[in-house]
Image: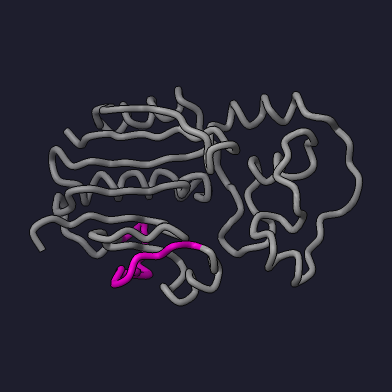
Amino acid sequence: MDSIRLNIGCASRPLEGYINIDMDSLEQIKQRYPHAKIPENVRVENYDIFALPFEDASVTEVRADSLIEHLAFPEEPKFFYEVKRVLKKGGLFHFSTPDFEDAVKTWLAAKDDWKDFYRSDDESIRKEHWFGNYSYTTANRWGYLSAMIFGSQNGEGQFHRNSYTLPKIRAILKHLGMKEVEVTQYRWKGDRDLMIDVKAEKL
């Protein structure tokens, strides 16, 4: 393979032309995300993301969309150092994560109007992957906004264990000796979490 491109933590978005890596198999991904449009003939592997089976400086690109917020504090440096290890000089590290500062500001501005416990029955989990109630509104703290901060409370591996801001990300890139190529922001699904999208180059 002339160009090795990795898509780590692919979840519902395995990509053609990449080695997709996830905790779930392709069949499990299809079951977990029944409405996702998954390309045919994609490859999904269950590699250890802290010990990837690739030689030093052998990978052209690493993608990690909405992954790093799921890493525990001790796992964070292991993952970033592993990405740096496998990337070639000039290789691209492209990742995205929720803007925690924006999520907290939104949470603080919302109503503190707790009404009922989250539903965790099988029907609600099937219908709403995030957290078991049916509203994506950000008017109330104790619904979707809590999921923005803590992650889904229904699915294994879905909890958020870490948080990121623009200054923290830039400090990590500097620490790794990576060059910031482009940092932009967008809304997840067009109207939800404000995401930080980063492209960085290994020097």
Residue 28 location (% of width, % of height)? 49, 74
Residue drawn at x 83%, y 30% is: 111
Toward which corner of the image does residue 170 lie, by quadrant? top left
- Is residue 159 shown left or right of residue 133? left
197 drawn magenta = no
Residue 70 location (% of width, % of height)? 52, 50
Residue situated in front as seen by the camera: 170 or 29: 29
Q: In the image as oriented, which residue stretches furthest toward the left? A: 2
Residue situated in front as seen by the camera: 123 or 158: 123
Residue situated in front as seen by the camera: 175 or 97: 97
- Is residue 50 shown left or right of residue 89? right
- Is residue 17 shown left or right of residue 97? left
Residue drawn at x 63%, y 49% is: 151
Toward which corner of the image does residue 103 lie, by quadrant? top right
Q: Is residue 128 above or below residue 136?
A: below
Quarter of the image for the N terminus: give it. bottom left
Residue drawn at x 70%, y 44% is: 136
| Residues shaded magenta | 36-51
Residue drawn at x 37%, y 61% is: 14
Q: Is residue 185 above or below residue 188?
A: above
Residue 16 location (% of width, % of height)? 27, 61
Q: Overall secondary structure of the magenta stretch?
A: loop
